[in-house]
């Protein structure tokens, strides 16, 4: 098969043609949205159109959307903007299975005197809402949890967690980066105070993201230096990227139910095929509370990095752990937090489907895997 098969949509996604066209148009109108003249007003109008599109998918008010450079910045803004702004004495509750863009700001806040509680997840990768409730000590608490885990796709019991957080008058930040565009993410149904996302995970461009900030919440800017984004994020906005983000959201809103069903069909075809052809494979994470597009599998005895390389040589792209870890043989902190051994974590691969993937591609991968897994296991055993 000459064409490559891309099964790494949780790392990033290909741009939709509609996004490319909108971004190309936006490149030609160069105004600064803060300028009051004609060119500035045109750029401002593009920005506000995108804001409305993002707000519409999320069930938010456009004024509650702050544009950022991506979810890493959104997560930093959410945590630093609430905790470093002195919700004294400051307590952050999070889990051991978060993305590094939450775990690393948590470390720096801890060094600055904020108390940080890192809760365990169970063997299926889920948090226990009663453990969140028990850890809540005061109103000066921010709880930060992933909606969907980037490595396993596991979904957290967010309604129950939100209930516990709100009962204590604390704040809830949700990193919904992997959930947006794959499952319904609505802030009119979930009482989150802050919610992060990124365009490039749903067929938009890299370098554009958002933070939902519920009306009335005081958030201090993390990037300072201008009045942009209602003083919550300084710096001239990435208009081209934000236009692409808006179109990606519009497409997601139109296609969501069909998209989710299609992803689940492909993911299930892959899993059923793997079980039928390989027998002894183990699925990591809850099979029922999971994103429709993600499958994390442990190929016991086959080092994941070697299997990844073997697949790459055959034209198939997958991931061993998070994208930011690839190239190193560091075992996934998420899988270790779920109780996998170092060896099992290192023998695990993530398959994530999305736009452009079809049944023939899945079947091709299923045809390759038994031979590759056997070869890699043989090498691993030497
Ligand atoms: C759950 C999660 N949060 C945050 C990020 C960071 O997003 P970005 O690449 O937009 O900074 C990612 C990207 O891998 C992610 O999967």
Image (spheres, rainbow, N blue to C red):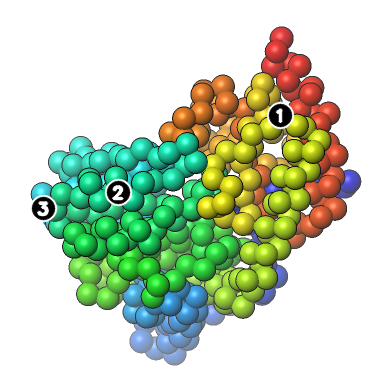
Q: Which mark is residue 280?
A: 1
Q: Which mark lies nearer to you, 1 or 3?
A: 1
- For the residue pair 157 and 70, the one nearer the viewer reads as 157
The extreme right residue here reads: 1
Drawn side of residue 7 relative to residue 118, left or right? right
Per the model, the C-alpha gap separating discs 1 and 3 is 51 Å
> Is the residue marked by circle 3 packed among few (<14), some (14-19), or many (20+) residues within 10 Å?
some
- Residue at 63%, 54% in the rendered image: 293
Name the residue carrying label 2. Answer: 130
- Residue at 44%, 71% in the rendered image: 186
- Above or below residue 270? Residue 374 is above
Query: Residue 354: in sight, yes or no?
Result: no
- Above or below residue 84? Residue 24 is below
The extreme left residue here reads: 88
Q: Which mark lies nearer to you, 3 or 2?
A: 2
Name the residue carrying label 3. Answer: 88
């Amino acid at each position: 098969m000459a064409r490559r098969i891309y099964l790494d949509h949780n790392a990033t996604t290909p741009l939709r043609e509609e996004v490319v066209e909108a971004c190309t148009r936006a490149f030609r109108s160069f105004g600064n949205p803060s300028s009051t003249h004609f060119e500035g007003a045109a750029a401002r109008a593009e920005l506000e159109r995108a804001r409305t599109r993002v707000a519409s998918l999320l069930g938010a008010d456009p004024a509650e959307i702050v544009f950022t450079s991506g979810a890493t910045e959104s997560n930093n803004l959410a945590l630093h903007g609430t905790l470093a702004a002195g919700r004294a004495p400051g307590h952050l509750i999070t889990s051991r299975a978060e993305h590094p863009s939450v775990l690393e700001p948590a470390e720096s806040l801890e060094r600055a005197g904020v108390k940080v509680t890192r809760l365990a997840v169970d063997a299926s990768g889920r948090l226990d809402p009663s453990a969140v409730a028990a850890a809540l000590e005061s109103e000066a608490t921010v709880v930060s949890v992933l909606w969907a885990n980037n490595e396993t796709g596991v979904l957290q019991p967010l309604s129950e967690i939100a209930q516990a957080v709100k009962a204590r008058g604390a704040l809830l930040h949700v990193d919904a980066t992997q959930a947006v565009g794959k499952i319904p993410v609505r802030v009119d149904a979930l009482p989150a105070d802050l919610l992060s996302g990124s365009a490039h995970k749903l067929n938009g461009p890299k370098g554009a993201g958002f933070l939902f900030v519920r009306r009335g919440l005081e958030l201090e800017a993390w990037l300072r230096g201008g009045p942009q984004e209602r003083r919550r994020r300084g710096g001239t906005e990435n208009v081209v990227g934000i236009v692409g983000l808006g179109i990606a959201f519009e497409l997601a809103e139109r296609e969501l139910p069909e998209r989710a069903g299609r992803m689940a069909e492909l993911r299930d075809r892959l899993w059923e095929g793997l079980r039928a052809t390989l027998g002894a494979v183990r699925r990591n994470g809850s099979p029922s509370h999971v994103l429709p597009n993600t499958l994390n599998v442990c190929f016991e005895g086959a080092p994941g990095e070697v299997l990844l390389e073997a697949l790459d040589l055959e034209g198939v792209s997958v991931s061993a752990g998070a994208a930011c870890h690839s190239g190193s043989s560091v075992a996934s902190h998420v899988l270790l937090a779920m109780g996998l051994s170092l060896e099992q974590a290192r023998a695990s691969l993530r398959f994530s489907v999305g736009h452009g993937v079809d049944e023939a591609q899945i079947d091709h991968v299923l045809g390759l895997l038994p031979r590759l897994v056997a070869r890699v296991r043989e090498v691993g055993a030497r």
